[in-house]
Image: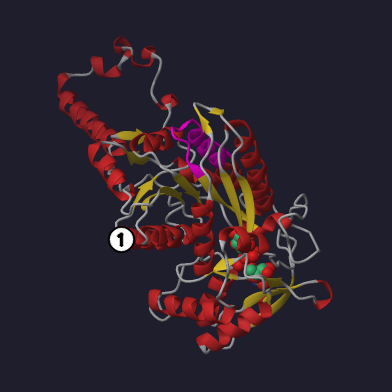
Amino acid sequence: MKQMSHLDDDDVPSTPGKFKIDKSPYFHRSTRSLPKLAFWSLLFLGFIFIFFYRSPSSPSPVSSDPSRRSLRTYSWGGPAWEKRVRSSARVRTRRGVSVLVTGAAGFVGTHVSSALKRRGDGVLGLDNFNDYYDPSLKRARQALLERSGIFVVEGDINDAALLRKLFEVVPFTHVMHLAAQAGVRYAMENPSSYVHSNIAGFVNLLEVCKSANPQPAIVWASSSSVYGLNTKVPFSEKDRTDQPASLYAATKKAGEEIAHTYNHIYGLSLTGLRFFTVYGPWGRPDMAYFFFTKDILRGKAISVFEGANHGTVARDFTYIDDIVKGCLGALDTAEKSTGSGGKKRGAAQLRVFNLGNTSPVPVTHLVSILERLLKVKAKRNIMKLPRNGDVQFTHANISSAQRELGYKPTTDLQTGLKKFARWYLGYYKGGKKAAS
Ligand SMILES: O=C(O)[C@H]1O[C@H](OP(=O)(O)OP(=O)(O)OC[C@H]2O[C@@H](n3ccc(=O)[nH]c3=O)[C@H](O)[C@@H]2O)[C@H](O)[C@@H](O)[C@@H]1O
C-alpha cells in the first residue's frame, strides 16, 4: 500500500545529538524509575503507531486552511485495489470506451459516470472528497455509483504518482475532467483553492496524459463565466473572453489557454465545455437554487440580487440531463490524441462548446417557481448585485454544440426544478433533515 502523507522529514529528528545518552537524566536515576520509563515509552510508541497507520477510510483531519484540504492522507495501491480499478474500468460493449472521470463524486461527475456505465462503457472515478460543501452528499453519490459497479478512487488530481499509476493499470481512451474548485463568489474567500485545483491540478493531469501511452482524449469542464463582463448576447464561442469578473472565471479561462498549449505541443485532443448554471437532483448545495430551497423551507429570508436601476439578474439555467447528453456527445465525437512519448505526430483536435439552455430566466422567476413547488412563500430580501464576481446575465448560443455534438436541451426550468424539488424533499426527508 502506498501512502501519501502531509508529514515531511522535518518532523523526524535529524540530529542524533539531540538524543545523546550520556546527557540523559534518566541514566542517573535509580532503577525503580525504569518501569515508569518503559510505560511512557510504550504509550509514546502507541501514539506514533496510531498516527501513522490510521485506517485508509478515515483520512486525516481536514486542515484549517481550506486551500490545503487536498493534502490529506490518501491511501491507494496494492493488488486488491488494482483489481477494483481494472474491473470498474472494464468496457462491456464492443464499441465502448474506458473513461477516467475526475470529480466523479461531484454533481456533474456522478451523473456523467452513471450514464457512461449504463451504456456499457468502462468508468473509473477519482475524487478528493474535499469539504467545500457537505462531504456526506458526496459520499451518498459515491454509494450510488458503487451500486452500479463504479469504483471512485479517493485522491487528488495534483497527485502525479497516483495518476500515473491509474494509467499504468488501465489504458484509458478518454478522460472526463470535472474535478475543480467551483463557485463564483467563494473565490474571494479562498483564492488559492482555485489556483490549486483549476490550474495546478489541471496542468498535473495534462502532464500525465501527455506521457500516457496511448494518450487519452480529454473532455473537461470550462464555464460560462469566461464571458465575464461581455454585454453582447447570446454568448458565442467566437466572442472575446478576456474580461473575467471573478478569479473563478479567470482560472477557467486560464484552463482554456493551457489546453491550447498542451494540444499544440503534445498533440492532446482537448474539448472544453462551457457549462451554464447547471442544476438538478443531487446538485451542489452552494448554488442559489439549492440553498434557496433549503432556506424557503426553513422560513429563512433569501437574498435575491438585482442589477443597477432594478435591472434583471438572469441565468441560462441548464438541466443536468441535458448537460450529460452534451458531455457524452463531446466524448463520442472526440478524435484520438496524436502524440506519443511526449511528442506530437500531427495536429490534434482542439474544441470549445457552450452547453446552455438558450432561454435565460430571471432569478426572481426561479424563486416564484420554487415557491409554487414547495408550497411555501419565500421571504425575499431584494439586494443590489454585490461586487463579488457575479455577472448580471448569461445566455448561450448553442449552435456549434448542436451542429457538432448533436446537443439539444429539452428541459425547461419549471420541469427541471420539479425534479430537483422531488429529489430534495426525498433526500432530506421532506426538508426536516436540512441540508448543511
Ligand atoms: O454557469 C457557470 O459557469 C457557473 O454557474 C454557477 O454560477 P452562478 O450562475 O453564479 O450560479 P449561482 O451561484 O447558483 O447563482 C445563480 C443566480 O442567483 C443569484 N444569486 C445568488 C446567490 C444569492 O444569494 N442570491 C442571488 O440572487 C446569482 O447572482 C445568479 O444570478 C456555478 O456556481 C459555477 O460553478 C458555474 O461555473
> Is the residue 287 above or below the residue 181 in the image?
below
Question: Is label 1 within 8 A of ligand 1 (CB to nearest ligand atom)?
Answer: no
Is 306 colored magenta in this rendering? no
Q: Where in the figure is residue 405, as x and y percent of width and height?
A: 57, 59
Asked which quadrant contains residue 117, the reply is bottom left
Instruction: Decide if residue 330 is on the left or right side of residue 104.
Output: right
Residue closest to the far right: 309
Q: Quadrant of ligand 1?
A: bottom right
Element carrying mark 1: loop
**Closer to the camera in the image, 284 or 237:** 237
- Taking the image as shown, residue 155 lies to the left or right of residue 248, namely left
User: What's the residue at 68%, 65% (across, down)?
Assistant: 396
Quadrant where the N terminus is found in the figure: top left
Three-letter amino acid code of the residue under disc 1: Ser
Of 217 and 232, which appears nearest the observer?
Answer: 217
Q: Is residue 203 visible?
A: yes
User: Taking 256 as reference, is 20 above or below it?
Assistant: above
Q: Which residues are magenta?
A: 200-217
Which colour style is shown? secondary structure
Q: Is residue 313 above or below residue 181?
A: below
Residue 111 lies, in percent from the top left, at: 44, 62
Q: In the image, what residue occupies the spot 68% across and 73% down? A: 360
Residue appearing at x 60%, y 42% in the figure: 199
Q: Looking at the picture, how far across and down is residue 214, in whole percent?
A: 44, 35
Nearer the observer, 61 or 312: 312
Q: Which residue is mark 1?
A: 148
